[in-house]
Image (spheres, rainbow, N blue to C red):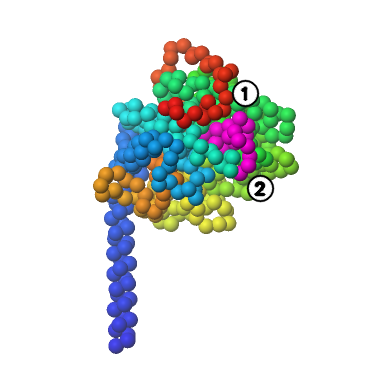
């Protein structure tokens, strides 16, 4: 009798397992084909998951715009990450305008809303909370002001509007001045926290300078970018893999020889417009070191010796999209959309993740699915004035004019 009960138990477990496998297979069968995310502009269409997630983003930022500097429902334990959640979502708005031109006015509007929320004190107050100073953009803190400047730049590039031209010019000048000042020391670029220099954050600042140059005809990205890239190549490249070390500390002129899965993914993507061949060369090395594939799924590790990381897996998806790696992108999409329980809201019909808050997944994954590649964004035929616009007068501006959240 005991043997029969045991066999029944085993049979039941097998049936449950088969049911789960079939349910999983059914969910995955409903996912869009991976190749559809990589179609060329003009052919590329929003996929059904992107349509649902775009619906959610519009709903979320409509509510955020109506609540001033509040972030209802956002996880305050992740508050220091809000800047990245907003910024990386904002970077998808040009891709939205390219893929679906009829939604370009919406993309422009919501990018403006994202700029507005990026300037909210709750997004940058970590600078004050950690005792680094009262002003989050006058010096250092490229981890915040680089993103804000890139958002200003993308808005002006997309729209041809000078709505944020003064702020964009003021912040660009600050970044340029700090890179120039860094020549007095042993590094080139701008630190994040005092005494912490990260390649991925400086890459954001350089990309904002590239856009400023394209609008105003200045040589900032080329002139200062060469200095920054030379320093990075000399001091922050791992000799074994060619990947980027985690950090440099100016106070001791020392590089921390740690390789990060997520920051290398981010860095390769953002530096690709400046050194396309080198980023393409190290992408396979990053993949070999950090990516682990399991049938139709894949994860990315943060450490070469560690296990899967949610943040590294997210940025791995962006890297796979930037470098046209369809197979890896599809496997990471499977992991994230299934693991994050992407589901339909029964009342409003949008798609959002059920196992994570708004801080990372709901914005970043949509953005990384949409991403058409930085070179396509930079080279797109955006509307611009016939003549090079006049550089705005900024002598009367200060940092808190740039951070004014009343301007939308």
Label 2: which residue? 257
What residue is rendered at 52% in x and 27% in y?
402
Badge 2 density bin: few <14, some 14–19, many ≥20, Cα 10 Å: some
Is 253 displayed left or right of 15 in the figure? Answer: right
Q: Quadrant of the image for the C terminus?
A: top left
* Quarter residue 95 falls in: top left
- Give the left or right position of residue 132, taking residue 369 as reference: right
**Residue drawn at the location 39% of the way across and 41% of the way down:** 366
Q: Which mark is residue 108?
A: none
Residue corresponding to mark 1: 223
Residue 101 falls left or right of residue 236: left
Quick check: is 400 in the magenta stretch?
Answer: no
Image position, residue 41 (x, y; %):
36, 30
The magenta region covers: 130-147
Q: Residue 61: where, in percent of width, then height?
A: 37, 37
> Of helix, strand and loop, which mostly describes the magenta segment?
loop
Q: Is residue 144 magenta?
A: yes
* Image coords of residue 399 (percent x, y): 57, 27
Query: Is residue 328 positioned above or below 148 on the image?
Result: below
* Mark 2 / mark 1, whichever is N-terminal: 1
């Amino acid at each position: 009798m005991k043997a029969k009960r045991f066999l029944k138990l085993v049979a039941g477990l097998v049936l449950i397992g088969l049911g789960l496998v079939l349910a999983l297979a059914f969910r995955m069968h409903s996912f869009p084909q991976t190749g559809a995310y990589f179609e060329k502009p003009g052919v590329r269409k929003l996929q059904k998951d992107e349509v649902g997630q775009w619906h959610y983003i519009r709903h979320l930022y409509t509510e955020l715009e109506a609540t001033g500097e509040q972030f209802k429902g956002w996880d305050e334990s992740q508050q220091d990450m809000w800047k990245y959640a907003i910024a990386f979502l904002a970077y998808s708005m040009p891709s939205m305008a390219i893929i679906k031109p009829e939604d370009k006015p919406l993309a422009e509007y919501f990018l403006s809303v994202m700029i507005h929320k990026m300037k909210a004190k709750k997004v940058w107050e970590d600078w004050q909370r950690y005792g680094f100073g009262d002003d989050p953009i006058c010096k250092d803190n490229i981890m915040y002001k680089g993103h804000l400047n890139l958002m200003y730049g993308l808005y002006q590039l997309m729209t041809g509007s000078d709505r944020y031209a003064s702020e964009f010019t003021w912040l660009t000048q600050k970044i340029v001045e700090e890179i120039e000042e860094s020549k007095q020391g042993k590094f080139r670029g701008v630190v994040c926290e005092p005494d912490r220099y990260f390649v991925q954050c400086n890459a954001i600042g350089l990309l904002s300078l590239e856009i400023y140059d394209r609008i105003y005809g200045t040589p900032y990205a080329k002139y200062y970018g060469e200095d920054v890239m030379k320093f990075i190549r000399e001091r922050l490249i791992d000799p074994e893999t060619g990947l980027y070390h985690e950090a440099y500390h100016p106070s001791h002129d020392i590089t921390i020889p740690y390789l990060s899965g997520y920051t290398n993914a981010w860095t390769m993507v953002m530096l690709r417009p400046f050194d396309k061949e080198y980023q393409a060369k190290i992408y396979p090395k990053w993949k070999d070191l950090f990516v682990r594939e399991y049938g139709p799924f894949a994860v990315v590790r943060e450490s070469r010796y560690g296990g899967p990381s949610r943040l590294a897996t997210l940025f791995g998806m962006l890297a796979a999209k930037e470098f046209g790696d369809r197979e890896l992108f599809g496997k990471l999409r499977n992991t994230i959309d299934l693991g994050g329980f992407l589901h339909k809201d029964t009342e409003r019909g949008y798609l959002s993740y059920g196992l994570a808050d708004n801080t990372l997944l709901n914005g970043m994954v949509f953005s990384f699915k949409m991403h058409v590649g930085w070179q396509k964004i930079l080279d797109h035929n955006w509307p611009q004035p016939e003549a090079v616009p006049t550089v705005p007068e900024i002598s009367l501006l200060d940092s808190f004019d740039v951070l004014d959240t009343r301007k939308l």
